[in-house]
Image (cartoon, grey):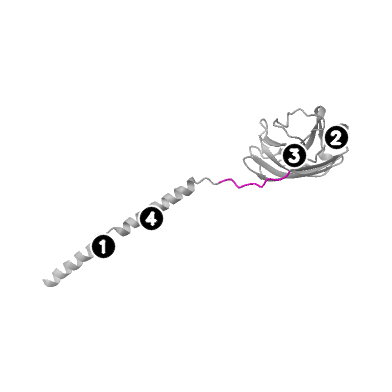
C-alpha cells in the first residue's frame, strides 16, 4: 500500500514539473513572432537603386561627307543635351540622341540653328524588351542588337552612315536605370569616323 502511494506521488510530481510552467512555450511563440516580423520588415524594405556615377559626355567626329562639310562648322568639343526615347510605334527600337547644344525640346524634332547638330543612334532590340545593357553591332541592319548612326544638321539634312561602307561599328550600353542610359560608341566608315561616351536621359 505504501509503495502504491509513493508511486502515485511520484507521478503527480512529474506532471506538475512538466506542466506547471509554460515559459518555454511562450518563448518559442515569441521567437517565431519576432522572426515573422523581421521577415516582413525585410520584404517591405525599399531597396534604393544603385547609384550610377555621372560621366562627362564627349563626341569626336571627323567627316569628309559632302553634306556634312557643306554645313556651317560643327563644334563637338562640348556635348549638351542627351536623350533616350523608346519608340512609340515600334517596340523593337529606341533612340539615343546627343546634341552639341543645350535644349529642353525633343532632339528628334527640334529645329537646328547654324552650327548645331544632333548625333542620332537608332538601336534595334528584342521585341517588347526595354533598353538593356549589352553590345550592339552598328555594321548590321534590322537584326536584334544592331543599330544605325546618323547626324542631323541644319537645313533639315541628315547625314546617314552606310553599313556597307563601315569597317567597324559598335555601340556599348554599359548600364540602364530608370532615368539614364550610359554607354559609348565607335564607328569607322568610308567618309566618317565617330566615337564618344554618353549618359542620356529618358524622356
**In this rendering, does residue 133 appear at all?**
no
Would you say the residues marked 2 and 1 are in contact, meaning their CB atoms lie under 8 Å apart?
no
Per the image, the residue denoted by label 3 is: 147
Q: Secondary structure at mark 2?
A: loop
Secondary structure that dominates the magenta span? loop
Q: Is residue 69 left or right of residue 98?
A: right
Q: Which residues are magenta?
A: 48-56
Q: Give the distance between the C-alpha atoms of the residues marked 3 and 4, in whole angstroms.
A: 57 Å
Q: Residue at x 32, y 57 (%)?
A: 25
Q: Give the distance between the C-alpha atoms of the residues marked 1 and 4, in whole angstroms.
A: 21 Å
Q: Give the distance between the C-alpha atoms of the residues marked 2 and 1, in whole angstroms.
A: 94 Å
From the top left corner, tell me how far across and down residue 24 is, in percent. 32, 59
Q: Which residue is farthest bottom?
A: 3
Q: Quadrant of the N terminus?
A: bottom left
Image quadrant assignment for residue 184: top right
Graded by Cα atoms within 10 Å as few (under 14), some (14 to 19) or many (20 or more), the crowding at tag 3 reads many
Q: Give the distance between the C-alpha atoms of the residues marked 4 and 2, in whole angstroms.
A: 73 Å
Q: Secondary structure at mark 4?
A: helix
Is the residue 52 above or below the residue 68 in the image?
Answer: below
Ranked by sequence position, the earlier of labels 3 and 2 is: 2
Q: Residue at x 38, y 55 (%)?
A: 31
100 or 176, which is in the foreground?
100
Ranked by sequence position, the earlier of labels 1 and 4 is: 1
Q: Give the distance between the C-alpha atoms of the residues marked 3 and 2, in whole angstroms.
A: 27 Å
199 or 129, which is in the foreground?
199
Per the image, the residue denoted by label 1 is: 18
- Tell me the number on the disc at residue 31: 4
Amino acid at each position: 500500500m505504501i509503495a502504491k502511494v509513493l508511486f502515485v506521488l511520484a507521478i503527480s510530481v512529474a506532471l506538475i514539473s512538466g506542466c506547471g510552467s509554460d515559459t518555454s512555450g511562450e518563448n518559442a511563440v515569441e521567437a517565431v513572432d519576432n522572426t515573422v516580423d523581421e521577415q516582413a520588415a525585410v520584404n517591405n524594405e525599399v531597396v534604393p537603386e544603385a547609384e550610377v556615377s555621372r560621366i562627362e559626355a564627349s563626341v569626336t567626329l571627323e567627316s569628309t561627307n559632302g553634306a556634312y562639310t557643306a554645313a556651317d562648322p560643327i563644334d563637338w568639343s562640348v556635348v549638351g543635351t542627351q536623350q533616350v526615347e523608346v519608340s512609340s510605334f515600334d517596340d523593337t527600337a529606341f533612340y539615343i540622341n546627343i546634341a552639341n547644344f543645350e535644349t529642353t525640346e525633343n532632339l528628334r524634332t527640334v529645329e537646328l540653328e547654324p552650327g548645331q547638330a544632333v548625333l542620332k543612334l537608332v538601336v534595334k532590340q528584342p521585341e517588347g524588351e526595354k533598353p538593356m545593357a549589352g553590345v550592339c553591332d552598328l555594321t548590321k541592319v534590322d537584326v536584334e542588337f544592331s543599330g544605325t548612326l546618323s547626324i542631323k544638321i541644319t537645313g533639315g539634312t541628315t547625314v546617314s552612315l552606310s553599313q556597307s561602307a563601315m569597317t567597324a561599328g559598335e555601340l556599348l550600353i554599359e548600364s540602364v536605370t530608370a532615368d539614364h542610359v550610359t554607354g559609348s560608341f565607335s564607328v569607322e566608315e568610308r567618309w566618317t569616323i565617330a566615337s564618344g561616351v554618353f549618359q542620356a536621359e529618358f524622356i
